[in-house]
């Protein structure tokens, strides 16, 4: 098993906006039905309930 390094950082507004802007770019139309986590790795530490 490969160890995982987690950032566990809080994102600033610009970083979230960048991820949203990337997804809204027409060149990314091929990305469908995906959940793209922008959470600094938190979802890998705390399971969803």
Image (cartoon, grey):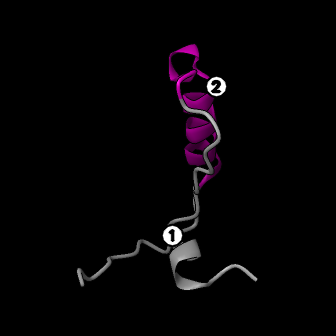
- Which residue is nearer to you in this view: 42 or 12? 42
Q: Which mark is residue 24?
A: 2
The residue shown at (58%, 15%) is 26
- Which residue is nearer to you in this view: 18 or 26? 26
Q: Which mark is residue 41?
A: none
Left or right: where 11 falls relative to 6: right
Left or right: where 40 falls relative to 6: right
User: Pointers 1 and 2 in contact (CB under 8 A)?
Assistant: no
Residue 33 percent across, percent down from the top left: 65, 41
The single residue placed furthest to the left in the displayed view is 2
The residue shown at (63%, 83%) is 47
Residue 20 percent across, percent down from the top left: 63, 36
> Which SS does the magenta portion mostly show?
helix
Q: Which mark is residue 9?
A: 1
The residue shown at (53%, 24%) is 30
Which quarter of the rendering shows the C terminus? bottom right
Q: Earlier in the sequence, mark 1 or mark 2?
A: 1
Above or below, comparing residue 6 to residue 37 in the picture: below
The single residue placed furthest to the right in the displayed view is 49
Residue 46 percent across, percent down from the top left: 61, 84
């Amino acid at each position: 098993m490969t160890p995982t390094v987690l950032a566990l950082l809080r994102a600033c507004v610009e970083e979230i906006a960048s991820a949203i802007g990337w997804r809204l770019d027409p060149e990314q139309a091929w990305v469908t039905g995906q959940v793209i986590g922008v959470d600094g790795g938190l979802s890998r530490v705390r399971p969803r309930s």
